[in-house]
Amino acid sequence: MMLPWIMQRKRVKISSMAKQFNLTEAELIEDLQMAAVCGVPPYTPDALIDVYMDNGLVIAEVPLVFSRPLKLSTAELFAISVMAQTALQLPGANKKGPLSTALAKIAPLMPSGAETIKVELPRTRFVKELLEAANSGERHEIEYFSPASQKRSTRIITARKVFEDAGRWYVAADDHQSGDDRVFRVDRIEHLTAVGIFDAIKEVQDEDLPWFSQKMPQVTLRVEPSARWIVESYPYISRVNNRINNREVVDITMSITSEHWLGRLLLRAGGGVKVLKPVEYRTLGKQSAQTILDRYKKTGTSI
């Protein structure tokens, strides 16, 4: 998306381009440096993407690979068709918008019989209702299950934003029980009932969501395959896949609500998680285990 944009304009200030794509200048420069060494075989200078930076400007020329009409392979047509059908099934998708029009245009290019491909996504309950509530400001009563405490609670919320992250749906909401802004995982909401009270609608930006707030403590964890459920269960700010000693590990940076919460998470993960930073949390898992062991010793209960 960035390359066609900059190629159309030839030269743009780095600061202007970073603002256009919601990146920091450092992030943009890193992406452009990577793009400059990409291309097609035989990777000679005329087959590389011709983009460089000079005196605060991003300068781009149209390389040979972009001067030829784009021809999609059968595999690429299948992939685009499946991804487009998937996106159209997401809650809130415009079924008659540009994506639907593009899907109709590539349909004649598909091999014979390919039009029978149908994509069906698993439905997450209450996503549609919460999307409508975020637009109307209506309050709802929910029964929410917390796996950390293994308890259910009933509370009144006003949905402000519904979003998807790593295959999970979340709702950022005003929690009238605690008086705070909270983020709830939608598939843990067991009951949802409208209460007929409407609050003023307010705009919520991603950086305002409490789970991702810069004001909350953040940790970077190295997650082994045995604890991959952490990556799949909790929102994270960034993710890097690594291969160390023939093991596929994931480094994630996430916000935490408290040191106590992180300690319990490390206990559940056992040896499957290592704290990379901050340094003061690296021994938190052992400290939490020792605290529990000392408590059992004091009460005389066997483990």
Image (tube, grey):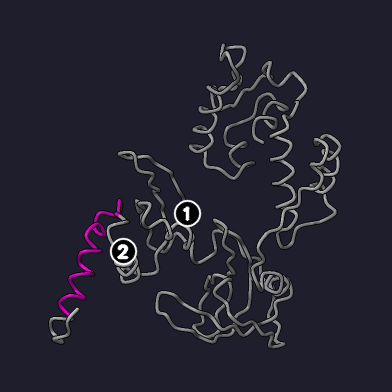
Magenta segment range? Answer: 274-295
Magenta span main SS: helix
* Residue in the image at 85% along x and 45% along y: 101
Disc 2 vs disc 1: which is toward the camera?
Answer: 2
Q: Give whichever of 197, 84 is nearer the camera.
A: 84
- Indicate the secondary structure of the residue bearing disc 2: helix
- The residue that disc 1 covers is 237
Q: x, y percentage for residue 90?
A: 70, 59
Position of the C terminus by quadrant: bottom left
**Which numbered disc covers residue 266?**
2
Q: x, y percentage for residue 77?
A: 74, 36
* Residue in the image at 60% along x and 19% along y: 40
Q: Is residue 59 above or below residue 161?
A: above
* Residue in the image at 64% along x and 68% along y: 124
Q: Amino acid at mark 2?
A: Leu
Q: x, y percentage for residue 27?
A: 50, 38
Q: CA distance from mark 2 to mark 1?
A: 18 Å
- Indicate the secondary structure of the residue bearing disc 1: loop
Dot 2, how many residues are within 10 Å of its Cα: few (below 14), some (14-19), or many (20+)? many
